[in-house]
């Protein structure tokens, strides 16, 4: 399992917390920044990270911005990406089980580091249930490939 981790300026502190969570879980990861004092644009980090998941170089990405919305919109533009914006533990579990989400987005201005860390752990530790859910995500892929 290889994870790529990125944030804009709004998510730097939370991203560093999530890096510690990944270390704790023993997950291999690459942190691509931002290492920024000033303002950056979330698509400049979210899209390259999502592309590196879609290409197969990484299995999953965790993307953080102020709300998580910019990162999720950006990542979901990349074919093959199923990015989930998650701010609760139930959704963290079910989006893996039902959507096979390969990108987790969180908003550093929405939730604190304690909940975000638990969400990241839950999301990392749950698997896709396939079955009836497989047909649903296949329909999304079919639309992308039209
Ligand atoms: C940056 O100010 C902010 O817009 C960004 O972090 C994010 O919340 C966008 O969705």
Image: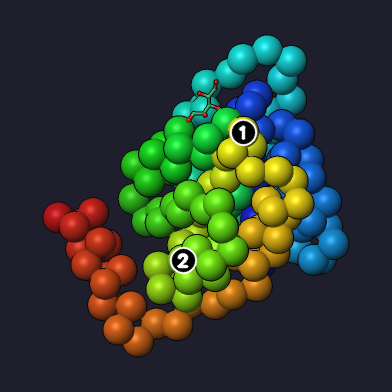
Report x, y in % for residue 34. Answer: 68, 28
Residue count near mark 1 (Cα–Cα under 10 Å), binned few <14, some 14–19, many ≥20: some
Mark 2, secondary structure of its residue: helix
Residue at which label 2 appears:
95
Viewer-closest of 95 and 88: 88
- Circle nearer the N terminus (2, 1): 2
Viewer-closest of 18 and 79: 18
Residue count near mark 2 (Cα–Cα under 10 Å), binned few <14, some 14–19, many ≥20: many
The image quadrant of residue 100 is bottom left
Residue at which label 1 appears:
109
Q: How far separated are the C-alphas under marks 2 and 1?
A: 21 Å
Identify the mark at residue 15; answer none if there is no mark: none
Q: In this view, does 92 lie above or below 109?
A: below
Tell me the residue at 77%/57% (across/down): 22
Mark 1, secondary structure of its residue: loop
Viewer-closest of 49 and 120: 120
**Contact flag, marks 2 and 1 (Cβ < 8 Å):** no
């Amino acid at each position: 399992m290889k994870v790529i981790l990125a944030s804009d300026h709004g998510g730097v502190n939370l991203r560093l917390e999530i890096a510690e969570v990944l270390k704790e879980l023993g997950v291999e990861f690459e942190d691509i920044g931002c290492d920024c004092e000033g303002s950056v644009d979330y698509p400049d980090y979210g899209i390259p990270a999502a592309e590196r998941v879609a290409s197969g170089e990484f299995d999953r990405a965790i993307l953080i911005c102020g709300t998580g919305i910019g990162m999720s919109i950006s990542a979901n533009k990349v074919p093959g990406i199923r990015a989930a914006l998650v701010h609760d533990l139930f959704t963290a579990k079910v989006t893996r089980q039902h959507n096979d989400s390969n990108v987790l987005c969180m908003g550093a201005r929405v939730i604190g580091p304690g909940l975000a860390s638990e969400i990241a752990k839950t999301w990392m530790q749950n698997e896709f249930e396939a079955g009836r859910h497989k047909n649903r995500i296949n329909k999304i892929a079919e639309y992308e490939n039209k």
